[in-house]
Amino acid sequence: MGTTGTPTNITQGSGTRGGIGESTLRPDGTLKVTGEFAYSSDMWHEDMLWGQILRSTVAHAEIVSIDTAEALATPGVYAVMTYDDLPTDVRHYGLEIQDTPVLAHGKVRHHGEPVAIVAADHPETARRAAAKIKVEYRELPVITDEASATAPGAVLVHEGRTDHHVGHVPHPNILHRQPIVRGDAGAAARRADFVVRGEYTFGMQDQAFLGPESGLAVPAEDGGVELYIATQWLHSDLRQIAPVLGLPENKVRMTLSGVGGAFGGREDLSMQIHACLLALRTGKPVKIVYNRFESFFGHVHRHPAKLTYEHGATKDGKLTHVKARIVLDGGAYASASPAVVGNASSLGVGPYVVDDVDIEALALYTNNPPCGAMRGFGAVQACFAYEAQMDRLADEVGMDRVEFRRLNAMEQGSLLPTGQRVDSPAPVAELLRRVKAMPLPPERQWLSAGEEADVRQLPGGLSNTTHGEGVVRGIGYAVGIKNVGFSEGFDDYSTARVRMEVVGGVPVATVHTAMAEVGQGGVTVHAQIARTELGVAQVTIQPADTRVGSAGSTSASRQTYVTGGAVKNSCELVREKVLEIGRRKFGAYHPAWATAELLLEGGKVVTDGGEVLADLTDVLEDEAVEVEAEWRHRPTEPFDLRTGQGNGHVQYSFAAHRAVVEVDTELGLVKVVELACAQDVGKALNPLSVVGQIQGGTTQGLGVAVMEEIIVDPRTAKVRNPSFTDYLIPTILDTPTIPVDVLELADDHAPYGLRGVGEAPTLSSTPAVLAAIRNATGLELTRTPVRPEHLTGTA
Amino acid sequence: MRVSFTVNGRRQEADDVWEGESLLYVLRERLGLPGSKNACEQGECGSCTVRLDGVPVCSCLVAAGQVEGREVVTVEGLADFARRRAEHSGCTTGTCDSGDGEGISLDEAQLGVPPGEAWGRAAKGQDSQTGEGVELSPVQQAFIDAGAVQCGFCTPGLLIAADEMLERTPNPTDADIREALSGNLCRCTGYEKIMDAVRLAAARQSEAV
């Protein structure tokens, strides 16, 4: 185990200012506060057209006919395209399984599925023309849950499946199923002195990134297309777009434009292919910008889930076994569902030691909105359920809820239910101790400003529904485990091109990757790494595009680890070349060139003893050193399809939360007063950004605890609240103070000992808030989000 | 139709405006001012907030024709607006009406993190995109320094709203800040760094008096 806060694997003096471990400021900060930063929806081109998508008004239907004549005849309209106009035989796409039609063919499988696209010279003209397209539907019965999906004679959402999961699922409306079986849960259950069983429901959450899906496609003279786009992974998009257009990948040139948040919602394609199709059809640049209504249909959501758990413990508080069944609603198309199943199952018992486990997780194909990646990715739903179970079981045993967790907490060396050994620090008990030790906010905090109640600090806020009467405080705890990086044998590499040269008399490093900066601050960290490794003050970060190799996805808390690792690796290779040049030029003048460990620091070549051997400007002169190299973390392996055994994960990330809530029990209104978090980050490369990630993730967990849910009508499978008026995300008034205690226990396998940060806080936040509300009200509360009617008994 | 109005102190005309267009659309698509953002276009998120004759409004809910002859300030003009306001009132930081110097200290605003360390101004380095030399208003600088910017899509609207609040309330309590910014959604930060930024801007403003 590394010393707290000390980065491991530093190959280079860390004396260069602005290097890793400092809270350097965002390189794009000034552009973002002046309005100059160009997001994908800000793109503009002379002569550009506006694209519009016509989406299905029903969830499941055969398309009897599509009549585009009137739309095409609208003045200002340049093109209308349907499935029949697609240029090649490749007419479907998908992250893992190519089951998603570019435009609907003969059938629509969910509300809001793209049916036709229009290009016109004004966005309103495009909208009105799209509304003139006549689509006749013959409605089919809707599959909305496990019962309807597997009922005898159920309509199949996808006929004739050929994907690689179909052979091991019990029903064609089940997309993927992953059991995790270890030990003998049945026998272990007989040893249990206490057993608790529970059924839990997790609502459908939306990423609700603020920057809508958008981009600009510009046709090129060589028959190709330039695409300016907001995405999480340029090369994954490219792989899906090019075949549909019938173009080789080098003729689809993609540049990342400003990304207004992602949170998993930009892993799948949205308007990319549609904009390119219209641009190539019309020969003009085409811009598409969703509005918020369309955005709710334009990306996948977090899987709603039904979770059934049985936990057992001995009377001295040791877990005996866990049995669980996790049913995730994948909606109409596969998206990332199979990987979400892998996470939900393999992390299904949480950060606890349990020898006897029997878990089954599966994803359904239904006619509900497609679900896929969102921050936390399957581990979120499981954490909500197992943490509720842990509270109930602690109560049964008669132990303090935090102590019960600490007694069963995993640590370095523990085995996961997959049989994988945790071979880096796993300070689960310590995080719980720390979060519990934080000072509590004062009782009756709404009186903190004086005698009068400040209603802004009470449930109901300025609605002035209470001055403190009927308000009860509750406190709840939770902890979670999230994997970092892509799992189950995926070749999860990244690429970095690093160049070093003298510009204007000073040495400058240039870093070029295809990493999608979505707000997380990867660009800040890349510059820090280059300073640390190359000892230069000035670093230029090139825009991300497809002229450099893949960086993998900005997902799974992986970019600082993997693309950060790639930047570090390429910097090391550049450094070796620079030193080689130095030895060639100056080696004869000083023996240290041959004998000493050499570093680059402060623009100079120095020995590890600090003696300056040469200025980088003299070493490089007119020469530029450039390296582009791929970098990989340790390989993983798939989970066995029957037992779930296998070294499936790269790294784990742990966070613990304590929630303090105040509930107006008469009206069912909840005020979250404080949401404290303790998280191990291995090594904080940029402490300011790390804390920002933890606070942001915590708040998204708060959202799905008390307000956020996409409501899908169970009779029609239609979305009922696709707007920020009806789908609520936390405002600054809903969000409490979020004190953060950052622990830094180095993971020796990772660059600098760092640990992926972004997702873990989204896991434990939700169950902590639920636990606090249960603590305040005494109610069981087995679903999230909690709404007022669940608290007043009027649901 | 033609719409004439003042944007960031300059007279602007937009021709061939369709009657249904919003002020937001005219700013973004006709006047080349995309700083005001289009996150919901239904008045719920505040990312398109501009000053209209001094009043913060969601520009997505203002019909373009309504701004005829009026004055608009967008994020692109915020630094200049704050500078002129400061010159007008004889102070250097933007909003110096109260001048009593009370309120949150810099230390409090920084929540116990040593100055220069967490915000690394000394160690900022010289990345190509930092845009040194650009004049910023106090609240813009505070958003950068406090780490209140992640994806940045909510930032322009928040800056306009926060600047306007500090103009009215130079020494806000936390509850004042939360109330004033409750119409601006942010999905990345969890708002804590935004609170820090506004406290910092207020503190620097008090210090400078």
Image (tube, rainbow, N blue to C red):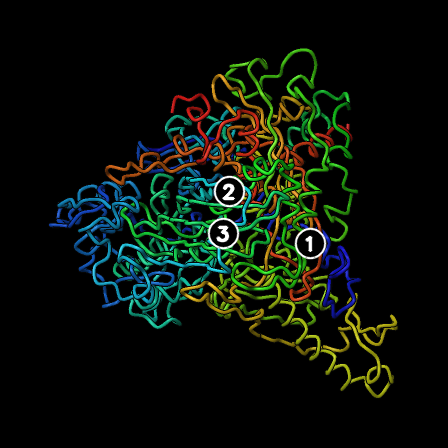
Mark 2 = which residue?
A195
Secondary structure of the residue carrying numbered label 3: loop
Mark 3 = which residue?
A348
Question: Percent x, y for residue B184?
Answer: 52, 32
Query: Badge 2 sits on which subunit?
Result: A
Mark 1 on the same chain as mark 3: yes
Residue A343 vs residue B123, the one in the foreground: A343
**Residue A684, numbered circle:** 1
- What residue is drawn where x is 26% and y is 42%? A127
Residue type, numbered disc 1: Ala
The answer to whether A456 is drawn above or below residue A774 in the figure is above
Q: Is residue B22 left or right of residue A772?
A: left
- What residue is drawn where x is 30% and y is 47%? A146
Q: Is residue A103 left or right of residue B93?
A: left
Residue B20 vs residue A7, the one in the foreground: A7
Question: Percent x, y for residue A376?
Answer: 50, 50
